[in-house]
Amino acid sequence: MARIKGALSTRKRRNKILKLAKGYFGAKSKHFKMAKQAVYKSGQYAYISRRLKKRDFRRLWITRISAGCKMNGMNYSTFMNGIKKAGVMLNRKMLSEMAISDPAGFTALVEKAKAALA
């Protein structure tokens, strides 16, 4: 029985890693050992950043809503409390879009929140 060596599968595996490392600086894109480390590390950064992105966007939306509330003489926390009591079911993303693109509509929401609190 002929002995089968793993050259083909090894080469395919290494080329796959080197293809992912294309564009990296210096030996990180040429040498398999360094490319493997760089690709694994970049994968970890990508995984972490996918979670951080959600956190960053929520912070941005809250900042925008807060700025819109301050323009109407209210702070963020009382506005969110009033919106919840008024029964308005809009998420922070939509509220921030309204604060930017439709200030008149956002002012109406602020008035509704004030009325629900009073």
Image: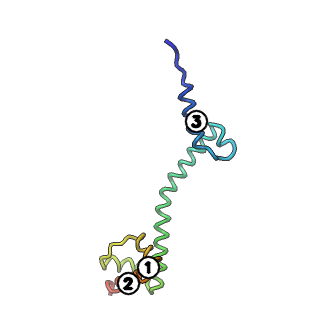
Picture quadrant where residue 91 is located? bottom left
Which element type, helix, strand or loop, lies under badge 1? loop
* Relative vertical location of residue 45 with respect to residue 54 in this rendering, above or below: above
What type is the residue that disc 2 sits on? Answer: Ala
Q: In screen coordinates, is 78 left or right of 85?
A: right
- Decide: few, some or many residues near mark 3? Use Cα within 10 Å; few <14, some 14-19, many ≥20: few
For marks 1 and 3, give the CA distance: 52 Å
Tell me which label, 1 or 3, sits earlier in the chain: 3
Furthest residue to the top? 1
Q: Residues within 10 Å of mark 1 (few under 14, many from 20)?
A: few
Taking depth in this image into account, of 20 and 66 the one nearest to the observer is 20
Along the viewing direction, whichever of 23 and 36 lies nearer the viewer: 23
* Mark drawn on residue 108: 2
Q: Which mark is residue 60?
A: none
Q: Earlier in the sequence, mark 2 or mark 1?
A: 1
Residues at discs 3 and 2 in contact (Cβ within 8 Å): no
The residue indicated by pointer 3 is 15
